[in-house]
Image (cartoon, rainbow, N blue to C red):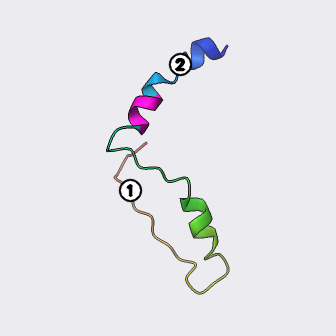
Amino acid sequence: MGIYLNPGNDGFRESVSSQIYVDKTGLAACTNEFINTEEKFICISRPRRFG
């Protein structure tokens, strides 16, 4: 079934190596440091209707 849903990762590999790709993997760990503190309100902006 993986053949039909995700035939390859060439497109992903190409986008990761481009200059416009932003990796936000570490964002969750960074924001978790502020849970239950006085700085718990964090604004993470994004374009409207993005994704």
- In the rendered view, would you say 3 is above or below 19? above
Label 2: which secondary element: loop
The residue labelled by disc 2 is 8
Q: Where, by quadrant of the figure, is residue 3 drawn?
A: top right
The residue labelled by disc 1 is 46
Residue at 63% x, 74% y is 33
Left or right: where does residue 27 sit relative to residue 49? right
Label 1: which secondary element: loop
How many marks the image carries: the answer is 2
Residue at 56% x, 58% y is 26
Percent coordinates x, y for residue 17 in the rendering: 39, 37
CA neighbours of label 2 inside 10 A, class few (<14), some (14 to 19), many (20+): few
- In the rendered view, would you say 47 is above or below 4? below
Q: Nearer the viewer, residue 15 or 28?
A: 15
Percent coordinates x, y for residue 9 in the rendering: 51, 24
Q: Amino acid at mark 2?
A: Gly
Range of residues picked out in magenta: 12-16
Q: Amino acid at mark 1?
A: Arg
Outermost residue toward the left in this view: 19
Percent coordinates x, y for residue 32 in the rendering: 63, 69
Q: Is residue 13 magenta?
A: yes
Indicate which label's residue lies in the foreground, 1 or 2: 2
Inter-mark Cα distance, 1 to 2: 28 Å
